[in-house]
Amino acid sequence: MTNPCPPEFEATRFSLEDLARLTGLSPRTIRFYIQEGVVDRPEGIRRGAWYEPRHLEQLLAIRRWQSAGLSLERIRELVRRRADVDDVPPAPRRPGDIEVWSHVALAEGLELLIEPCRAGLSPEQLRRLAVACAQAADRIRSGKE
């Protein structure tokens, strides 16, 4: 049975099946996320339980984080800290992690060490940062500061 109301008039309550349809996740997966504590429990109990827009937002955030390569363990950490969906902090460094760093020579004996993924700067921004650092080092060496 289809809902005759346009989407903007739909109720803000969702069934488990509604969430599954809207997120592309199976009801079983949604239940698993609830059990794991990465999605809030539904309102009400048993067959009378319902879900709200926040549940939909949580599930969509999990999908985005998973497609960005985050593990369920990392997602659980983010949920505990109530991280913003678009502001995913880098995972903490662990023994055995491999990272690629860039060394930018500013002057003799002076380098700028950058981890591009964590810096969150575009290549142009990194170039401007390196130039500004080199200019600051020149001013300090010449005694103009």
Image (spheres, helix red, strand yellow):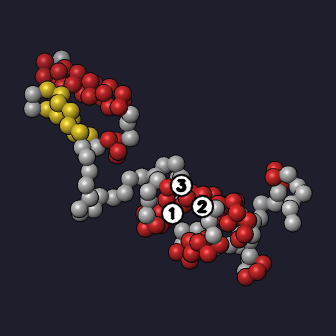
Q: Position of residue 3 (x, y in %)?
A: 86, 60
Q: Compute the Cα span from label 3 to label 1.
A: 13 Å
Task: Work out whether mark 2 precedes mark 3 in sequence or the reverse, and give the earlier one.
Answer: 2
Amino acid at circle 2: Gln
Q: Residues within 10 Å of mark 3 (few under 14, many from 20)?
A: some
Q: Residue at x 87, y 66 (%)?
A: 1
Choose mark 2 or mark 3, whichever is in front: 3
User: Could you tell me if residue 7 is visible in this image?
Assistant: yes
Amino acid at circle 1: Val
The residue wearing badge 3 is 64
Instruction: Kindly indicate the quadrant of the structure image that contains residue 74.
Output: bottom left
What SS does tag 2 mark?
Answer: helix
Amino acid at circle 3: Arg
Q: Residue at x 25, y 46 (%)?
A: 100
Along the horizontal axis of the image, is 109 left or right of 71? Answer: left
The residue wearing badge 1 is 79
Q: Residue at x 59, y 72 (%)?
A: 29
Q: Position of residue 130 (x, y in %)?
A: 26, 28
Task: Work out whether mark 1 precedes mark 2 in sequence or the reverse, and give the earlier one.
Answer: 2
Choose mark 3 or mark 1, whichever is in front: 3
In the rendered structure, find residue 58 and report the number of the disc placed on it.
2
What SS does tag 1 mark?
Answer: helix
Q: Please tell me whether residue 40 is drawn above or below residue 139 in the rendered image.
A: below
Q: Please tell me whether residue 100 is drawn above or below residue 131 in the rendered image.
A: below
Task: Work out whether mark 3 precedes mark 1 in sequence or the reverse, and give the earlier one.
Answer: 3
